[in-house]
Image: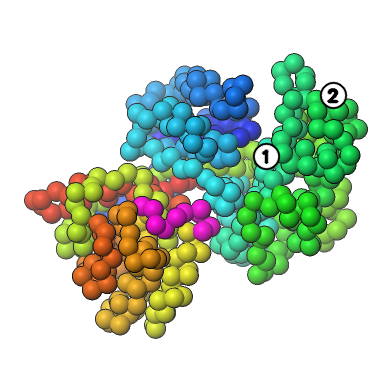
Amino acid sequence: MTVGIDIGSSTSHLLFARVVLRRDTEGLSSSFTVIDRKVVWRSPILLTPFLPDGTIDARELRHFFLHCYEDAGYRRSHIDTGAVILTGEAIKKKNARAIDEIFASESGRFVCATAGHKLESMLAAHGSGATTLSKKRGACGLHVDIGGGTTKLALIDDGEIISVAAFAVGGRLLAHDKDGIWSRIDDSARAVAEELGLSADPDTMADPGNRAAIARRLAALVVDEVLGTPLDDMGRRFLLTEPLERRVEPTYITFSGGVSEYIFGYEDKDHGDIARLLAGEIIAQLTPRIDIPIVDAGQRIRATVIGASQFTVQVSGKTLYMNGADVLPRHNIPVVHLGRELPEVIDADEIAAAFRQSADRQDRDTRATVALAFSWTGSPDYSRLLAMAKAIKAVAAPDGKRGEPLVLMIDGDVGQTIGRILDRELGIHTHLISVDGVRLKDLDFVDLGEFMTPPGVIPVVIKSLLFS
């Protein structure tokens, strides 16, 4: 049993899922594959509660989640693992600390991931079903996730996310409070109001015509981003990342996020914001300018994780290199996977650039505690091993020194050798744990237990984010 919890700037929700894993082999270090996943209960969508000082009301969130467990008929003891995704306002320091306290007792069992704009773009692409759809079609699609405060783009080719981007347009940039006063006027809405010569105050926003004008301008910005046309000054001002890199032209478009419920006609009621207006304007402005279809990938406002799978392997001393047992145990280390096969001649600069690109897509800092993962293919010649070790050092310790422990997770029998080269020949000067015989991917997390001697093993718990 797993639980997926999504806490964002605009909405929060929870779902429970039952996951079936099957052992791939009978060996001690065998891996497991998810063969079935079924969502068994979904919560209502909660408008994320905020206090008057602008911070998230963790107390009300706690009550919401407790009621969800009760309504679903589950106790915490029923849940084996889970994933908590924090986005937008939820990742700000004060909010994240308060939310962490809600799940402190689940430490080690739950993955807690704070998602910046790029990682959020990836999670939306996976959670919506857009990556699976691209894989099934063997085609390139552009995924557009329009939330409350931001829009995230992901260009997906044959199931692989090749580029992401985000900008500050969403359906709750303008919203009224419980008294019907249009008091929420976010920075992007203020900027558009100013451009249109409107005052950014509740009385002005109470006029439906003024809200419609703002939604029309915001929709134009979304359409420019979707089509890849040159951005005007406002479009460039709203960018939260680098512009989307379009190496392949998409053959269809998918949408998710709260605004997509209106785009696909699943929702027609207003919820105290401009989401319905924005959706209508996007369709009106976009459809005359495209000749590719708009496709529903399956998940819209619930485009997020359904939880996590989890299994443990025992890594023996014969398959690892370690110079810092005192830094163990460690929980929830994010995985940054190389994401490509190794060539026969390994170029250290090219491999380092590929690692950095993979980390950048997930908003990961490779100088922090991360697990660099890759598959070793080809001969274990010293020249290839040395080049790989140099690439790892360039990524993990760009200035020659590193303050945080470094974890390597390798699918191949070279963990000891690469660890020894990094430590003894290249002098990476940090606690190093290099493990082989483990297959990982992006959006995985690992726990490393204490080194047990005898028998000389490290328990490794592998937790993978799961999507519908």
Amino acid type, mark 2: Asp
Whether residue 74 appears in magenta in the rendering, the answer is no
**Residue at the extreme top:** 179
Q: Specify the principal SS of the magenta part.
A: loop
| Residue 130 falls left or right of residue 364 | right
Task: Say whether residue 198 is visible.
Answer: yes
Whether residue 362 appears in magenta in the rendering, the answer is yes
Residue 257: x percent and y percent? 66, 41
| Residue 278 falls left or right of residue 309 | right
Q: Quadrant of the N terminus?
A: top left
Task: Say whether residue 24 is visible.
Answer: no
Which badge, 1 or 2, comes first in the chain's sequence?
1
Residue 375's quadrant in the figure? bottom left
Which secondary structure, mark 1?
Answer: loop
Q: Is residue 207 above or below residue 88?
A: above
Q: Quadrant of the C terminus?
A: top right
Bin the neighbour count of mark 1 within 10 Å (Cα to Cα): few under 14, some 14-19, many 20 and up.
many
Provide the residue designation for mark 2: 203
Provide the residue designation for mark 1: 149
Q: Nearer the viewer, mark 1 or mark 2?
A: 2
Residue 285: x percent and y percent? 86, 50
Whether pointer 1 and pointer 2 mark residues with C-beta atoms closer than 8 Å, the reply is no
Q: Nearer the viewer, residue 293 or 228?
A: 228
Residue range of the region highlighted in magenta in the rendering: 360-369
**Residue at the extreme right:** 209
